[in-house]
């Protein structure tokens, strides 16, 4: 990850499209989930290890606002960009974009909560340090 964020390449397959040949809107949610997962993996390793080592810690999407700007099509090569916008006690705000080249197709503001046993808990300090947005 650099100041531009974590980049995940994604190929659009037939299963990602609707009858019109455009990417179905819910497919973008899957692409962005993969982007968030790979961001965490690149910083802290496998999420199942993090879950185990942090005694049941999980991340849940609390809020997501999306702007669908342009459509993607089958066989497009996309990039999901994920970057930290803000860290709070038990949550983080992330900015995500799905791009085709330099063109932004979908942008999202995502709030992710850190939870254990159904209750919000503070982000672990080691992970917080890795997620800190660039100054």
Image (cartoon, grey):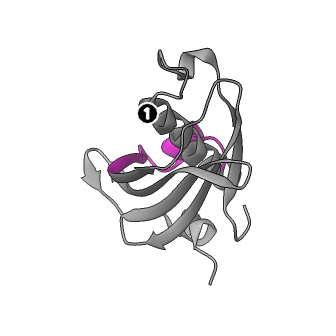
Which residue is the extreme one toward the bottom?
Answer: 135
Asked if the stretch drawn in magenta spans residue 60, the answer is: yes
Q: Is residue 111 above or below residue 26?
A: below
Provide the residue designation for mark 1: 25
Where does the magenta region start and end? 45-63
Q: Is residue 113 left or right of residue 33?
A: left
Residue placed furthest toward the front: 20
- x and y, in percent, of residue 34 in the image: 58, 38
At 36% from the left edge and 52% from the top edge, which residue is drawn? 64
1 vs 52: above or below: below
Q: Residue at x 36, y 48 (%)?
A: 61
User: x, y percentage for residue 47?
Assistant: 56, 41
Vertical arrangement, residue 21 with respect to residue 52, above or below = above
SS at mark 1 in the image: helix
Say whether residue 24 is magenta: no
Q: Please provide percent x and percent y for residue 57.
A: 42, 48
Task: Report if residue 93 is visible in the image.
Answer: yes
Q: Quadrant for residue 87, please give it.
A: bottom left
Residue 123 visible in the shown view: no
Residue 28 coordinates in the image, percent (x, y)? 50, 37
Q: Quadrant of the C terminus?
A: bottom right
Name, please, the residue furthest toward the left. Answer: 119
Q: Quadrant where the N terminus lies?
A: bottom right
Instruction: Report the front residue among 73 and 96.
Output: 73
Residue 111 lies left or right of residue 131; in this view the side is left
The answer to which image quadrant residue 114 occupies is bottom left
- For the image, the number of numbered tags is 1
Residue ID at (72%, 55%): 102
Query: In the displayed structure, does residue 7 sit left or right of residue 84?
Result: right
| Crowding at mark 1 (Cα within 10 Å: few <14, some 14-19, many 20+) | some
């Amino acid at each position: 990850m650099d100041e531009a964020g974590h980049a995940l390449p994604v190929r659009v397959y037939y299963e990602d499209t609707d009858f019109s040949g455009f990417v179905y809107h819910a497919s973008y949610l899957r692409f962005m989930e993969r982007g968030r997962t790979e961001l965490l993996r690149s910083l802290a390793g496998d999420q199942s290890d993090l879950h185990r080592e942090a005694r049941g810690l999980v991340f849940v999407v609390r809020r997501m606002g999306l702007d669908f700007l342009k459509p993607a099509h089958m066989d497009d090569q996309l990039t999901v960009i994920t970057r930290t916008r803000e860290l709070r006690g038990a949550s983080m705000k992330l900015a995500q974009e799905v791009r085709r080249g330099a063109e932004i197709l979908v942008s999202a503001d995502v709030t992710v909560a850190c939870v254990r046993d159904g209750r919000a808990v503070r982000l672990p300090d080691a992970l917080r340090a890795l997620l800190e947005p660039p100054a």
